[in-house]
Image (tube, rainbow, N blue to C red):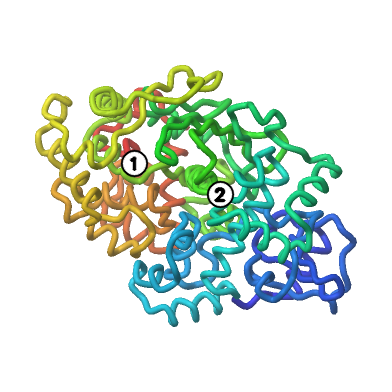
């Protein structure tokens, strides 16, 4: 990926927060790479080398800065560059695709050759897929050393390292210090553990993002769709149960006033897989988005410009679990948001698992008592008494069976068009449902449910064909355009008008 070096240098001179995570600066005189907002004295222009990713900087032999902490940046947007294959690969790596597999397996999941995938990564990211995965583990381990009181063994396993020895070796090779020395340095800087009492059950992590972020809009959207007993959301916090590391857990996320980060508290059966929990939460709240780039593109459209101004920092709310979201979307077909929420609660009451968590749910999450059923459980369940049309119950059963057999992959392994086609092959799943699932569960920024009546109504009642034609100008951010139209419409409508009887917003 070619960077405008003059623009990069201006960004580090002004410590422009908008560029945080979009590139990293290697300083030749020190051998260290930094975020654009590093508080250290700005190096001379001739000493700077600019990299599109932290992995590229580390591949070139630079060490992470201990002052600006590259591990605390909001991360490079998943759609970096122009390659859809690279974007999907980055999402799979973030989900742990290279934790227990190798590059040929990743390439096979993406449907490309390994050499071609490596060439694409070097062109767009500046580093190989394995280097990206290794940097991800290293930076997350450094984050845990700084922000938690987890033991070194817990940090190693939570970060995806296969052994403590490999963790120690990687940290020493990267930082020229032992993990214990890094933790002591963080303590001296005034950091310290977010879990100072090692007997406390909760782990706290800070999840950075590029401002602005409209927490109220996110919480309102998720709260209207929260599955009773599984989720709750409001102005103060979002909470939910989860199936984690072979057991059950509860997560809570809340905004941090005055800071560009969210605070996550996790009560888990163990620390293994913590890196995956953090990534799921980042996807759920779309923290990798670049709001300035999205607003600049969509704001150029006269229809969207007022909505962009009214809803700065709009995000596309994701999903903790793709299968759960897909079932919720099917239940939302042709009914209101409220009705779909009630049906989801009924399904979980009858087929979910009672929450089993030592010490019970944390304070404020006492109403969370169920865990969403697995695909295997719903594939074998009798849904005839759920209160939905027989065809819709059959669609849920069929989807569950397809997912359980691995015939439908609710991940980023295939492109938008192929994913939508695969979902539409499931009886009872149509274009609206498939696009909605791709938009929220699979993080496809250009997914667009063009048949949605709510979107057509928000634009004055245009036809589906006219809406599709209009949306061509919104590519590659059509999912964000849809959220702008939905959220602006919801804020402007009276409560009775927010319940749309066609499945709009119900997923």
State the image coordinates of residue 326 (x, y, percent, origin top left): 29, 43
| Residue 18's disc number | none
- Above or below: residue 483 compared with residue 13: above
Q: Quadrant of the C terminus?
A: top left
Q: Quadrant of residue 106?
A: bottom left
State the image coordinates of residue 111 (x, y, percent, origin top left): 33, 72
- Secondary structure category for the residue under label 1: helix
Say which residue label 1 marks.
325
Q: Residue at x 42, y 28 (%)?
A: 231
Q: Quadrant of the N terminus?
A: bottom right
Q: Quadrant of residue 56?
A: bottom right
| Relative horizontal placement of residue 187, taking residue 321 as reference (left or right) | right
How packed mark 2 is, by other alpha carbons closer than 10 Å (few <14, some 14-19, many 20 or more), is many
Q: Residue at x 82, y 75 (%)?
A: 28
| Relative horizontal placement of residue 93, taking residue 168 as reference (left or right) | left
Query: Can you see residue 307?
Result: no
Say which residue label 2 marks.
157
Q: Decide which of 334, 126 is in the foreground and name it.
A: 126
- Above or below: residue 190 compared with residue 103: above
- Above or below: residue 445 compared with residue 265: below
Q: Decide which of 295, 439 is in the foreground and name it.
A: 439
Q: Earlier in the sequence, mark 2 or mark 1?
A: 2
Q: Residue at x 24, y 40 (%)?
A: 330
How packed mark 1 is, by other alpha carbons closer than 10 Å (few <14, some 14-19, many 20 or more), is some
How many marks the image carries: the answer is 2
Q: Decide which of 275, 70 is in the foreground and name it.
A: 275
Query: Can you see residue 449?
Result: yes
Q: Decide which of 31, 26 is in the foreground and name it.
A: 31
| Relative horizontal placement of residue 124, taking residue 71 as reference (left or right) | left
- Secondary structure category for the residue under label 2: helix
Q: CA distance from mark 2 to mark 1?
A: 29 Å
């Amino acid at each position: 990926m070619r960077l405008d070096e003059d623009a990069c240098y201006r960004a580090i001179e002004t410590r422009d927060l908008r560029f945080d995570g979009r590139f990293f600066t290697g300083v030749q005189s020190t051998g260290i790479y930094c975020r654009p907002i590093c508080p250290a004295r700005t190096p001379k222009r001739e000493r700077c080398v600019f990299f599109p990713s932290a992995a590229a900087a580390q591949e070139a032999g630079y060490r992470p800065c201990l002052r600006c902490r590259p591990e605390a940046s909001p991360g490079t947007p998943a759609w970096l560059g122009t390659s859809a294959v690279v974007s999907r690969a980055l999402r799979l790596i973030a989900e742990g695709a290279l934790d227990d597999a190798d590059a040929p397996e990743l390439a096979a999941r993406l449907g490309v050759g390994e050499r071609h995938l490596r060439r694409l990564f070097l062109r767009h990211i500046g580093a190989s897929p394995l280097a990206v995965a290794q940097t991800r583990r290293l930076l997350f381990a450094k984050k845990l050393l700084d922000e938690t009181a987890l033991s070194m063994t817990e940090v190693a396993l939570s970060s995806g390292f296969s052994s403590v020895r490999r963790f120690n070796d990687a940290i020493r090779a990267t930082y020229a210090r032992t993990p214990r020395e890094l933790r002591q340095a963080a303590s001296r800087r005034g950091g310290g553990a977010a879990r100072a009492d090692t007997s406390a059950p909760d782990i706290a992590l800070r999840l950075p993002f590029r401002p602005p972020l409209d927490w109220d809009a996110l919480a309102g959207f998720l709260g209207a769709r929260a599955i009773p007993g599984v989720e709750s959301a409001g102005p103060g916090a979002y909470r939910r149960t989860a199936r984690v590391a072979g057991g059950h857990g509860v997560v809570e996320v809340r905004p941090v006033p005055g800071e560009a980060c969210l605070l996550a508290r996790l009560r888990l059966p163990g620390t293994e897989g913590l890196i995956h929990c953090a990534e799921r939460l980042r996807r759920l709240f779309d923290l990798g988005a670049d709001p300035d780039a999205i607003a600049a593109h969509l704001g150029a459209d006269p229809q969207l410009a007022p909505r962009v101004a009214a809803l700065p920092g709009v995000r596309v709310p994701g999903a903790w679990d793709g299968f759960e979201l897909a079932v919720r979307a099917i239940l939302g077909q042709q009914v209101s948001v409220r009705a779909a929420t009630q049906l989801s609660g009924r399904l979980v009451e009858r087929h979910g698992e009672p929450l089993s968590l030592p010490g019970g749910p944390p304070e404020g999450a006492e109403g969370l008592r169920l865990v969403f059923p697995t695909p295997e459980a719903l594939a074998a369940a009798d849904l005839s008494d759920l209160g939905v049309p027989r065809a819709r119950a059959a669609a849920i059963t069929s989807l569950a069976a397809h997912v359980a057999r691995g015939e439908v992959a609710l991940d980023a392994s295939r492109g938008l068009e192929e994913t939508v086609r695969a979902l539409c092959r499931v009886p009872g799943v149509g274009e609206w449902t498939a696009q909605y699932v791709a938009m929220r569960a699979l993080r496809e920024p250009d997914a667009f449910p063009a048949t949605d009546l709510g979107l057509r109504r928000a634009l004055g009642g245009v036809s589906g064909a006219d809406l599709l034609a209009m949306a061509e100008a919104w590519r590659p951010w059509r999912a964000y355009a849809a959220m702008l139209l939905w959220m602006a419409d919801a804020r402007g409508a009276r409560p009775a008008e927010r319940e749309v009887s066609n499945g709009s917003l119900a997923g």
